[in-house]
């Protein structure tokens, strides 16, 4: 393999075949017998409903970055892949495909329909694995899991039966959230509330014994009036006391219903008279139970009206509403409609308006389970949330949680392990079917997808409820759970209480929350807006490395991210910069056998007074410390800025150029020493970048011919702490200032400037002069002399020194004074900022010592430069 990189960075060529190389060499496999400390992440299983979207790419990039970072930091890592059967969502997709073929699931029957869903699952699982590959996710496929596998089904049945026998699962007829499109119950958190235009409809309920009198009742859902069993007023409402225990005529069907009194009714709300429909409203259901009222269902499971609706039988509920209003108007029983905007519940999966509906369902009792979560989060063993505010979000939800509806009227999913005797009222709940199966029929419902997903952290590690597996013993609790904040309640909370209940341990140590990806206008990506972005297209156009860098470094934990092609292009340009710098280094390397062992580097530095090398190694140590601290806190934006500044500015713009200057006229051994440091720092850069940009770093690393793969490297913080402040504050700052001076004065690049260097005592050390002279001609086409220049001079402040140049026709003295005054103002701001930080007790107590020291050094540097500028302004002002 030639060491030289291609002239142009081609992301498609670079990213080709790398994944196969990693898999073939087992770099992603966990080692349960390893003596290294374990670090584990189980992937939030994507639904087998379709291909991955940009949110999955963000999720995966975060997880893979942590896994690769931990692997390079000396951990035995497990990144466990898997997928979710996603009951309601997947069934909907398959039914849609069948409808396009003119078939329904009922035409096929349950068994054949489920087979069709399995075929869909295999098709889309294959797509998802290919996308994982494109993203570069370092998954251990030898332990891949599926939420509806036979093994998971066995565990789900065990968990269900255990909870049932403990009284934590029960079956009851209740008002549930009903999705009429999917014809299934859904849980409270699967209901999305949206502001919707609607109406408040007012009707006359005429009194039985006085046809000239009526009670006015307002409702937002007139179609449910066919299920009315009474009217309710507040017993303290003087307006209606005389009507209590009388009867009124239901305007929609002519039935007589009583007027009862209950303090639940708000006297001030509406007309003060409430219709009670126990089978179609949760609050009415409670009143119905209290007074033993009938529970009349007037609607079919598909949202159409049933036979109780008379001539509206079979109509969709909303069409029935329209026709009912017309009929009531014709009869003189309709009073008015008020236009309102109110919160209406929509099904999270189908977007159908949810119908409160009386149905017999299975539920999980939540009080006991929720208390376990609350107690855990009050303990020293709590789960750490990043950002921490989601700990409060979790606790508040747990404190106000409702019982969980877990049964779904679907065919795809874990069928509830309950059987009903054909001949008696007996019910049998068990992990396996009863022996005399011919006398029993199994409950047709399946479990909510989240019921099996709640077991994911320990189910994936092959915990079976009887004994622990070697994976469970080594990798549980898992290290970090990474997921979007939109499923804290759906999934994170449920994993926690199920893990506490069954393993008596928390499921993970940390939870890293990320936000949603929005379009460039800040809108949520959706099919209806047509603003979704296919991550595979992004990879095709910019590369996986560019996409990963963009996704990781442009948003803090818990915050949303705006998609930006401009930032993606900037990410690609950054990689291209790294590529070109690496190419230069590799050309320098040529066929030399360079020893970049750390001890050899120390030897070179100890024997060599090259300040540029000491400077870059000291900067490298600072960057490594900042990188480590940010990685441990999941602060990827800080990592991005830190690496970008070090690579682009310190390494590419300065160190490579300093090495070029140092190489002029030096012997071969000195050149080799410079190349050694150049390559060593590049290797350390690649190791830090690798978790974020796995493909390009592997490509460049392999050209260095150090080890077989960068995944065999180790991230270590190198303790290089040379006193190089003078080099940075004087040499580099001087070159910057001279460049800025040339630009401000419109001086041609090839025009040689003659400078002297002076401090407060009009002298500089020989060492400073020699170093300065070595680099100045290379960088800024200038000559330097030791002694003070004779005549009128222009002064350029650098720390406590001044670069002085003989004034010429191109020098504007007034502009120089204004420039100095501007610099003075800027320094005043920096000094005030620094003083504010250093007087902040909170910062001093919590910040890393290295950060505090850096801030103190900045403050001292600012003060020295400020004093020098003030003195120079006085001199110029007095002329």
Image (tube, grey):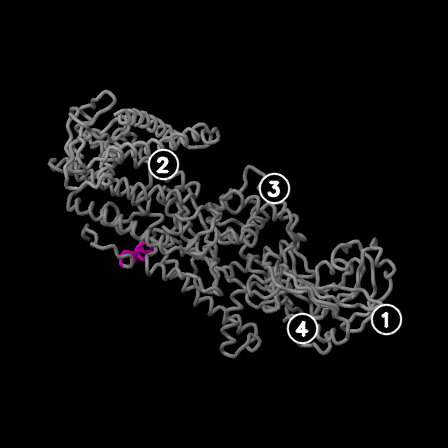
Q: Can residue 528 be spotted in the picture?
A: yes
Q: Secondary structure beneath disc 2?
A: helix
Q: Earlier in the sequence, mark 3 or mark 1?
A: 1
Q: Name the residue tied to disc 3.
A: 375
Residue placed under numbered mark 4 in the picture: 322
Please name which of the two marks, 2 or 4, marks the residue nearer to the observer: 4
Which residue is label 2 attached to? 625
Q: Is 374 situated left or right of 749 in this image?
A: right
Query: Which numbered disc flags the more N-terminal residue, 4 or 1?
Result: 1
Q: Residues within 10 Å of mark 2 (few under 14, many from 20)?
A: some
- The picture places residue 678, in percent across and down from the top left corner, at 22, 40
Label 4 – label 1 distance at C-alpha: 26 Å
Q: Is residue 455 above or below residue 605?
A: below
Name the dominant secondary structure of the magenta segment. Answer: helix
Image: magenta residue range: 13-24
Where does residue 467 sit, x and y in percent of width and height? 53, 50
Give the vertical position of 704 relative to 790 (above or below): below
Q: Residue drawn 25% across and 54% down?
A: 9
């Amino acid at each position: 393999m030639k060491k030289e990189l291609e002239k142009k960075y081609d992301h498609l060529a670079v990213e080709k075949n790398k994944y196969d190389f990693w898999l073939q060499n087992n770099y992603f496999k966990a080692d349960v017998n390893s003596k290294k400390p374990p670090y584990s992440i189980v992937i939030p299983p994507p639904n087998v409903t379709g291909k991955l979207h940009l949110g999955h790419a963000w999720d995966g990039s975060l997880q893979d970055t942590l896994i690769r970072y931990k692997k390079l930091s000396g951990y035995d890592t497990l990144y466990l892949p898997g997928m979710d059967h996603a009951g309601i969502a997947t069934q909907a997709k398959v039914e849609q495909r069948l409808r396009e073929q003119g078939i329904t699931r009922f035409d096929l029957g349950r068994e054949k329909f489920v087979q069709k869903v399995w075929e869909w699952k295999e098709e889309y699982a294959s797509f998802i694995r290919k996308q994982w590959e494109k993203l570069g996710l370092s998954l251990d496929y030898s332990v891949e899991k599926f939420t509806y596998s036979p093994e998971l089904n066995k565990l789900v049945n065990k968990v269900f039966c255990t909870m049932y026998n403990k009284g934590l699962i029960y079956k009851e007829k209740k008002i549930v959230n009903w999705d009429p499109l999917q014809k299934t119950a859904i849980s409270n958190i699967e209901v999305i509330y949206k502001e919707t235009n609607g109406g408040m409809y007012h009707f006359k309920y005429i009194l039985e014994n006085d046809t000239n009198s009526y009670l006015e009742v307002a409702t937002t859902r007139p179609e449910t009036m066919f299920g009315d069993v009474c009217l309710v007023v507040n017993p303290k409402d003087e307006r209606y006391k005389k009507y209590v225990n009388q009867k009124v005529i239901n305007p929609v069907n002519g039935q007589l219903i009583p007027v009862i009194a209950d303090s639940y009714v708000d006297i001030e709300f509406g007309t003060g008279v409430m219709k009670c429909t126990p089978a179609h409203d949760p609050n009415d259901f409670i009143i119905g139970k209290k007074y033993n009222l009938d529970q009349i269902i007037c609607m079919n499971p598909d949202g159409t009206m049933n036979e109780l609706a008379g001539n509206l039988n079979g109509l969709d509920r909303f069409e029935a509403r329209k026709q009912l209003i017309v009929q009531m108007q014709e009869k003189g029983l309709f009073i008015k409609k008020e236009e309102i905007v109110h919160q209406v519940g929509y099904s999270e999966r189908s977007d159908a308006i949810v119908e409160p509906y009386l149905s017999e369902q299975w539920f999980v009792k939540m009080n006991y389970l929720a208390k376990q979560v609350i107690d855990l989060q009050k303990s020293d063993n709590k789960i750490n949330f990043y950002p921490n505010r989601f700990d409060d979000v979790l606790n508040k939800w747990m404190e106000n949680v409702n019982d969980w509806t877990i049964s779904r009227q679907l065919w795809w999913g874990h069928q509830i392990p309950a059987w009903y005797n054909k001949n008696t009222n007996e019910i049998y709940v068990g992990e396996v079917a009863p022996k005399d199966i011919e006398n029993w029929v199994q409950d047709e419902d399946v479990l909510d997808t989240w019921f099996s997903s709640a077991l994911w952290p320990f189910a994936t590690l092959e915990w079976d409820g009887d004994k622990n597996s070697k994976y469970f013993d080594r990798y549980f609790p898992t290290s970090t759970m990474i997921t979007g904040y939109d499923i804290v309640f759906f999934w994170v909370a449920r994993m926690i209480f199920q893990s506490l209940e069954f393993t008596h341990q928390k499921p993970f140590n940390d939870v890293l929350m990320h936000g949603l990806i929005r379009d460039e206008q800040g809108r949520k990506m959706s099919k209806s807006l047509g603003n979704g972005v296919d991550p595979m297209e992004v990879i095709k156009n910019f590369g996986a490395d560019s996409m990963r860098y963009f996704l990781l470094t442009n948003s803090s934990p818990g915050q949303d991210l705006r998609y930006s092609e401009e930032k993606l292009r900037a990410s690609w340009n950054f990689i291209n910069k790294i590529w070109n710098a690496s190419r230069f280094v590799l050309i320098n390397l040529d066929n030399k056998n360079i020893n970049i062992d750390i001890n050899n580097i120390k030897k070179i530095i100890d024997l060599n007074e090259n300040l540029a090398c000491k400077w870059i190694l000291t900067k490298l140590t600072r960057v490594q410390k900042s990188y480590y601290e940010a990685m441990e806190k999941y602060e990827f934006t800080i990592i991005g800025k830190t690496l970008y500044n070090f690579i682009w500015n310190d390494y590419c713009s300065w160190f490579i150029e300093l090495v070029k200057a140092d190489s002029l006229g030096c012997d071969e051994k000195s050149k080799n020493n410079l190349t050694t440091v150049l390559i060593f720092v590049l290797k350390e850069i690649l190791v830090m970048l690798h978790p974020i940009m796995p493909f390009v770093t592997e490509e460049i690393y392999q050209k260095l011919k150090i080890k077989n793969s960068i995944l065999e490297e180790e991230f270590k913080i190198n303790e290089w702490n040379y006193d190089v402040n003078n080099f940075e504050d004087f040499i580099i700052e001087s070159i910057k200032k001279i460049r800025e001076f040339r630009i401000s004065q419109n001086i041609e690049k090839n025009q040689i400037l003659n400078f002297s260097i002076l401090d407060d005592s009009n002298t500089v050390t020989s060492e400073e002069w020699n170093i300065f002279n070595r680099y100045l001609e290379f960088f800024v086409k200038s000559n330097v002399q030791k002694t003070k220049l004779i005549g009128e001079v222009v002064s350029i402040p650098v720390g406590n020194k001044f670069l002085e140049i003989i004034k010429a026709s191109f020098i504007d003295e007034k502009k120089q004074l204004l420039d100095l005054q501007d610099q003075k103002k800027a320094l005043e701001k920096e000094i005030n900022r620094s003083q504010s930080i250093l007087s902040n007790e909170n910062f001093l107590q919590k910040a890393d010592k290295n950060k505090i020291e850096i801030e103190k050094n900045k403050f001292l540097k600012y003060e020295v430069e400020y004093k020098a500028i003030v003195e120079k302004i006085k001199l110029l002002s007095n002329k």
